[in-house]
Amino acid sequence: MSLAKRIIPCLDVQDRRVVKGVRFQDLRAIGDPAELATRYEAQGADEMVFLDISASVAGRKTLLSAVQRTAERLFIPLTVGGGISSVDEMYQALRAGADKVAINTNAVSNPRLIADCAERFGCQCVVLAIDAKRTGPAQWEVYTHGGRNPTGLDAIDWAKRVVKLGAGEILLTSMDADGTAYGYDLELTRAVVEAVSVPVIASGGGGRPEDLYLALSAGGAQAALAASIFHYGRYTVAQVKAYLRRKGVIVR
């Protein structure tokens, strides 16, 4: 029996407020993370992602008080990311209410962190976030520090490597599509899905229910993460799921 596909709203948090931009720039405030998380859960969200997007840039730890306040209101799984640089910091995030922890910047600078966290907490708790920008035909480069720093790493090769190190899931964001509402980068999504053996969450570009459908079908992703479509009230999670059911996609 096929596994149900997941719909995951994303809360990009800066200064304790949810924000949203286009291609990681021109951020505008949306609202309170705990209130938005509660709203989206009530609409039928399967999971929630909370990303402290300025933690790595500022060289600080994740704002755990904001994480805890959000987690206390949720009954669905919560993934938390931003500034996690050690096994102990992952432990603190889990203690604050996270079910899974996403790592990006510090995994690139210290790949051993992935293996250490997976060994301590299990692969299922470790989500490797990849922010990728297209550099040529079928080529994408990994960026860190909230999309500011190019790494020279090929996104497909990096995805394969992190899974070998112990990542249990990949959160894959197309920097080119992020916030545009023009649709996911299906070529990038499919390339990573075919390269790894763990679930891939497609992120970046979801503006219509059809976009999420394509990410889950043509792109092959196990889950679709979206922000603008929900933040700006274009569609609810329930409306997206109803559309997916009509298209034959198995959702909860």
Image (cartoon, helix red, strand yellow):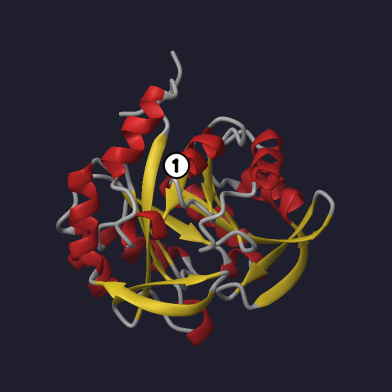
Q: Which residue is mark 1?
A: 124
Q: Furthest-bottom residue in view?
A: 58
147 or 168: nearer the viewer: 147
* Residue 227 in sight here: no
Q: Is residue 58 left or right of residue 11?
A: right
61 or 7: nearer the viewer: 7
| Coordinates of residue 119 in the picture (x, y in percent) | 50, 48
Judge whether 20 appears above or below 122 on screen: below
Question: In what quadrant of the picture does the C terminus appear?
Answer: top left
Q: What residue is at 49 percent from the left and 55 percent from the top? A: 117
Task: Assign a secondary structure to mark 1.
Answer: helix
Q: Furthest-top residue in view?
A: 1
Determine the image quadrant of residue 209. Answer: top left
Kind of residue sitting beneath label 1: Gln
Judge whether 137 appears above or below 110 on screen: above
Rate crowding at label 1 as few (under 14), some (14 to 19) or many (20 or more) other CA atoms within 10 Å. some
Judge whether 239 appears above or below 55 on screen: above
| Coordinates of residue 48 in the picture (x, y in percent) | 33, 52
